Amino acid sequence: MNNGNALQFFEKMTAKAKDNPNCVKMANNTDYTHTDAKFILKYANKNTEVLDLGSGTGLIVNKIYDKVKSIDCVEPFKEFSDHIIESENVCIINSGVIEFNTHKKYHLICLFGLIQYFNEKESIKIYKKCLNWMKPSSKIIIKNQFGINEDVTVSGYSEEQKTDYFAQYRHINKEVSILKDVGFKNTNVVDIYPPEANRWNNTHFYAIVGEK
């Protein structure tokens, strides 16, 4: 499994994006983006410059853009990013996350519902780049499902999604170790959602907060 497999899945999804910004949610009957936005704003204010990787249709960005100094949104598919709000402090970059690069430095980098679509080698590459893009004492937040007891890799046809689906939910302790090995410090794992959000017995939603 690699990000190329996941991108094929999302490319097919763009056909649904024009009239449905919620199409990017894997569980279409739930929406925890208000929880995501509230959590991000614990680490952000009107002086915060944010980099959001994998912004999708802006379900989170559109809830926080007016409460921070700026947000740079990296999203491979224009069909998704067309839903992101137009504002002077919002910059949309249509690029793959692995391919993206910048000389800018940020106070906060967000990867929400993203890193599960990259294998371990790809994720390490992304984390190293993020560390380079961060100001001193800045924060990174990684939120998605992680394996509870072991790595959980999904590769093939998904009954729920009704198509081929690719994701790697690495063991939560392993992901924390990866971040520490890359150079992040003061890592903290937060059980971000209510129990009912965790529908599978082998994965769990967590937010990992790390510091440069």
Image (cartoon, rainbow, N blue to C red):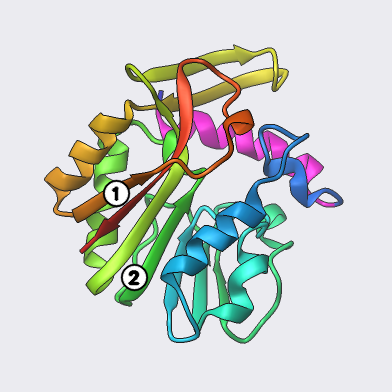
Residue 158 horizontal/vertical position (percent): 63, 15
Does the magenta segment cover residue 17? yes
Residue 132 horizontal/vertical position (percent): 22, 65
Instruction: State which quadrant residue 105 falls in.
Output: bottom left
SS for callout 1:
strand
Residue segment shown in magenta: 2-18
Which residue is pictured at 31% across the width and 49% down the height? 126
Does the magenta segment cover residue 195? no
Which residue is pictured at 57% across the width and 31% down the height? 195
* Picture disc at residue 102: 2
Which badge, 1 or 2, comes first in the chain's sequence? Answer: 2
The amino acid at mark 2 is Thr
Q: Is residue 109 placed above or below 28 in the rendered structure?
A: below
Which residue is pictured at 80% across the width and 41% down the height? 16
Q: Is residue 15 visible?
A: yes
Q: Are marks 1 and 2 in contact (CB under 8 Å)?
A: no
Q: Which residue is mark 1?
A: 188
Residue 120 horizontal/vertical position (percent): 29, 32
As drawn, the residue found furthest toward the right would be 19
- Left of 4 or right of it: where is 87? right
Q: Is residue 126 placed above or below 2 in the rendered structure?
A: below
- Left of 15 or right of it: where is 92? left
- Camera-side residue of 144 and 128: 144
Residue 130 horizontal/vertical position (percent): 29, 59
Which residue is pictured at 78% across the width and 34% down the height? 29
- Left of 208 or right of it: where is 143? right
Q: Is residue 94 visible?
A: no
